[in-house]
Amino acid sequence: MASGPEKPLLRALAGEPLSRPPWWLMRQAGRYLPEYRAIRAKAKDFVELCLTPALAAEVTLQPVKRYLMDGAILFSDILLVPHALGQKLTFREGEGPILEPIENSSSIAGLDPSQVVPRLEPVFETIGRVAASLGPHTALIGFAGAPWTVATYMVEGGSSRDFRRVKSWAYRDAEGFDALIGILVDSTTKFLTAQIEAGAEVVQLFDTWAGVLPETAFGRWVIEPTRSIVAALKQRFPDHPIIGFPRGAGLLYERYITETGVDGIGLDTMVPAGYARERLQPLATVQGNLDPILLITGGSFLETGVRDLRRLLGDGSFVFNLGHGVLPETPPENVEALARLLAEPIATT
Ligand code: CP3
């Protein structure tokens, strides 16, 4: 392919403006789809679903079959890395993830990055299966959690309101906490390398909790680990685009892009499109950022929201997405309406 990429998502991530933005949605596979709930009921638990290639591949393809997105995101979870490092992980219905918390530098001794790729072998098999059945226009997106966000779950033992434990450890014992982040940089690099080798054409780093850190800590535990992962992947796969999603980074989005070297930047719902157009789009392909609640309500606010984003961002390099994941209450017909809106020719006035 000497003439460069053909798939719209890859073209946009290479910096090309397209008259219709390529699109995919974070959490596009999931509980809002009845066919997902049917498969989910067959698996013993959520981790088993992620690690059963036939089922995970089927679930990955479900939204793409319905809506013909330009990207198929691997069905998996960011917490499979701690699971593969040897930390016990369960998902309780309605409660989210539960991990046995890691509390200090002595409890990280048992975590072994060399086990991550062998233990996550089923994920690479899922990627191979999806790659073999995708149409010629859809790109396969692999992903991992960024070290900071994964560390929050590992230290808090699950979701958190104020991140008190993980921040206290980081501020009290920065070198000790760096050791945990270092293990995650190493594991994540190996995991994403193996995903690309298996057939992922794009990878996204989810840093869901990037926005809870003040600037100095953001530089050390969001930017620096991401920069090392990006540099390692770029050295090996210079043509594979990397999208970073530092949710909530606010005024630090700009630094994040220039210092990490990502090709695409995932914008959360709060980033103003006019700001993104002026300050971020010249630095990277922007991706986002429709409010996921608009996809629940539908109707004229959804239409206006989509048209405004296309008008403001659509004449530069742009990938349409939500500002966070699809919510379980989303009516599938609203995603259908979104697909139709995105197929309309661009209205620039
Ligand atoms: O985007 C996709 O469609 C691919 C699949 C995907 C899942 N999780 C499936 C999932 C992706 C990319 C993720 C990422 C993920 N996982 C993040 C980062 C993005 C974000 O949403 O902020 C985070 C923080 C997690 C951790 C996680 N996994 C939590 C907190 C939960 C529980 C909350 C919930 O929605 O139930 C999960 C479970 C999970 N991961 C589900 C799905 C479809 C729901 C599990 C179920 O079906 O019961």
Image: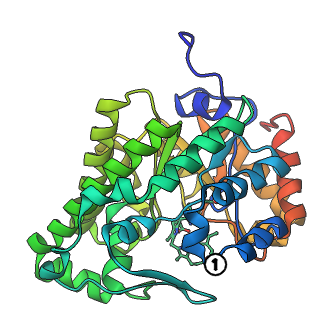
Is any part of residue 235 visible from this angle? yes
Q: Residues within 10 Å of mark 1 (few under 14, many from 20)?
A: few
Residue 13 point in image, percent of width and height: 54, 34
Name above or below for residue 269 compared with residue 73: below
Residue 181 point in image, percent of width and height: 23, 65
Name above or below for residue 75 compared with residue 99: above
In the foreground, 338 or 197 = 197
Determine the image quadrant of residue 30: bottom right
Determine the image quadrant of residue 246: bottom left
Determine the image quadrant of residue 120: bottom left
Residue 290 point in image, percent of width and height: 68, 59
Question: Is residue 244 toward the left or the right of residue 168 in the image?
Answer: right
Secondary structure, mark 1, is loop
Residue sitting at 38 percent across and 87 percent down?
162
Is any part of residue 300 visible from this angle? no
Q: Which residue is mark 1?
A: 44
Residue 272 point in image, percent of width and height: 57, 57
Question: Is residue 297 toward the left or the right of residue 272 in the image?
Answer: right
In the foreground, 314 or 235 = 235
Q: From the image, which quarter does the N terminus lie in?
A: top right
Image-quarter location of ligand 1: bottom right
